Image: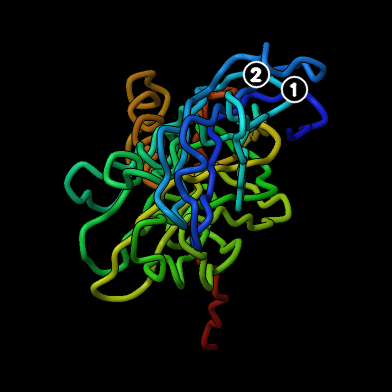
Amino acid sequence: MLDLLKTYSVNRVTITNRFDCCNTRINGSEIRIGNNSSDFFSNPVCAVVSTIPAGATYSYLCDGMEGRYVTVNIPGDSKILTLCEVGVYVIFQDNLAAGRNVTQSSTYGLWSAEHAIDFNPGLTKSWSACSSTKVQTNPWWRVDLSSVYRVSSVVITNRLDCCPERINGAEIRIGNSLENNGKNNPICTVISSIPAGVSSTYICNDMEGRYVNLIIPGDSRILTLCEVEVYGEGPLLKKTLVKIKLKSSSTLSEPEMRAQLLSQLQSVLEERGFSDVTLKWSQPPEMEVKRKEAAPAQSARRKR
């Protein structure tokens, strides 16, 4: 029995079976999650393990079952329970990426960008639970947090079935710009490597930004992500007053012209990633007229 010390919503449990012998001993074991430590058999069952091949790691989805205690038991007499590794993955309520809008530079088959934030790390079926781009130059994946946050850490889960080296060299970038698909935003870290099926945490030291990008620089690259989690605090709400001096032949005393100008400014800001900005005149613009200064008078000397 594993004591998580407090109640969590459990997303999944992974079990690794022994490799050398007796792999059938695990057959029929139950994974239970609940808050009863004295009678854990009364806790609800997440899953029943039918079989796990020798040395394999299987993942069992628990869909947010709540509990402090996680147990694995085999009902029956004269049984032996052998566990080589047990992983418990909980849902932290402050995962900023959950339910957000995501996109990627291209999509390979059914490996859509949304699979990277579906709480399913794809340890059994990567194709139905992980995101992946096609082979391309500088592939990227991005989550829009909808507002500016201070990002403390990003967790990346690599695929288990194959190709863990594809993630090598990926950059985690955080910022507010969509220029160059977010590739100009500051770097939190560069991923050197992540072992197959492992979740690695990267500390970003409260970097501020609305967009979290993962980018792999280079040609003929593939970006595959089985889970992306973003943690931090916010949103950070800021009100900014801007004074703008414009050069225009049009008169801004007319309401239609002022509205047209705000619309143009809004479009420029959206292109730069500031789509949540509201523009309005705090006061009607004043026209500044520059008068041409007269040339200094030259004294004339009369000839005598």
Image height check: is 52 above or below 133?
above
Kindly identify which residue carries mark 2.
66
What amino acid is found at the position of numbered circle 2 in the picture? Glu
Write the residue at 42% across / 44% down.
Answer: 52
Image height check: is 285 above or below 232?
above
Image height check: is 111 above or below 263?
below
Q: Are marks 1 and 2 in contact (CB under 8 Å)?
A: yes
> Residue 48 at what x, y percent from top left?
48, 26
State whether residue 57 appears in this view.
yes
Identify the image quadrant of residue 38: top right
Indicate left or right for 233 with 197 as reference.
right
Colour pattern:
rainbow
Q: Quadrant of the C terminus?
A: bottom right
- Mark 1 and mark 2 lie on one chain; the one further toward the N terminus is 1
Residue at the farthest top position: 42
Write the residue at 59% across / 40% down.
Answer: 243
Write the residue at 56% across / 53% down.
Answer: 199
Q: Quadrant of the N terminus?
A: top right
The answer for how far apart the CA atoms under marks 1 and 2 are is: 6 Å
What amino acid is found at the position of numbered circle 1 in the picture? Thr
Q: Number of callouts in the render?
A: 2
Viewer-nearest residue: 225 or 293: 225
Residue at the farthest left position: 109
Q: Pointer 2: residues within 10 angstroms few (<14), some, or many (20+)?
A: some
State whether residue 286 appears in this view.
no
Check residue 7 in the rendering and tell me which mark sits there, or answer none: 1
> Residue 173 at what x, y percent from top left?
52, 58
